[in-house]
Image (cartoon, rainbow, N blue to C red):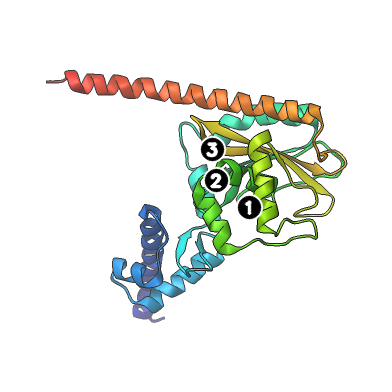
Amino acid sequence: MNTRSTATRADAGVRSVQVTLDIIELLAASEGEMGVTEIAQALGLGKPAIFRHLVTLTERGFLSQNPSTSRYHWGPRLYLLGRHAPERFDLASLAAPAMRALGEAVGQTVVLSAPGPHGIVVLSTLRSSQQVEIGVREGSSLALNASAQGKVALAFGPEELRERLRATGLVRFTEHTLIDPAALDAEIARVRERGWAVAPNEVLLGINTLAMPVREQGRLTGVLALVGSVQFVTAPPDERSLAALRAAVRAIEDTLHGADTSTARPRRERAATKEQTP
């Protein structure tokens, strides 16, 4: 057995992991997208080596590549890992009681999503009690133009999402998907006016979603949605579903407000203590 060769391979493996983590940390600290040359220069490494790591990270979903600029940014898996990191006040954890109550009230799948750097990411899914189960995988990204969650994000979220959609274009999933920019703009205006969105048959035939924004201090924090067959999650939605979804959103927003209040007080107390310390 060649111990020197084995040690060399082990060192190379450790180095590869270090480069991978360096890339992730660099992009996490970046305020925008970065290109291969920019990343290579920042890390002091050659472009071919950096490119190989970027390809692997993109294939695994930890990074995403902007098709119009070929530059890289956070991917859905990296965002989901961040959301699952132990935090005192995590949106999915805070929303869990309201999601359970909503699921019990309407008997449909409940999905919580959040705007990521470049789209909508599913944070939590509570499956329905129906015989035919419809699930949305946690960590998956939702199409901005075809999903009800995406329409809500476009209506109430940051301008960056709309710019992202203009750069990537509108993707067709079924014959019902909105791929005309003017038609989508009109739909987003309606969503902004009425406060909810639906997307019957737009991603998958026979399936509809009813979604509403979850806001904290006026800023879009998440999107809460009911997902089910068009037979049960109708378009337009029935008043019972709208009322139940509104109540769940209010409960989450009240919880978020309480969390902000409880964390603000200790911060103020620490600041006051620091000022009084000689």
Q: Position of residue 36 (x, y in %)?
A: 40, 71
Give the label on residue 115, or none. Answer: 2
Task: Say which amino acid is labelled 2.
Answer: Pro
Determine whether, in the image, residue 277 is placed left or right of residue 58. Answer: left
Q: Where is residue 109 in the image (x, y as percent from the top left)?
A: 75, 39
Q: Crowding at label 2, few (<14), some or many (≥20) Cα neighbours within 10 Å?
A: many
**Residue 235 shows in the view:** yes
Q: Do the residues labelled 3 and 2 touch (CB within 8 Å)?
A: yes
Q: Which of marks 3 and 2 is nearer the N terminus?
A: 2
Which residue position is annotated with label 3? 220
Which residue position is annotated with label 1? 144
Task: Say which amino acid is labelled 1.
Answer: Leu
Q: Quadrant of residue 233?
A: top right
Q: Does dot 1 land on a helix, a strand or a loop?
A: loop
Residue positioned 45% across, 74% down in the render:
52
Task: Say which amino acid is labelled 3.
Answer: Leu
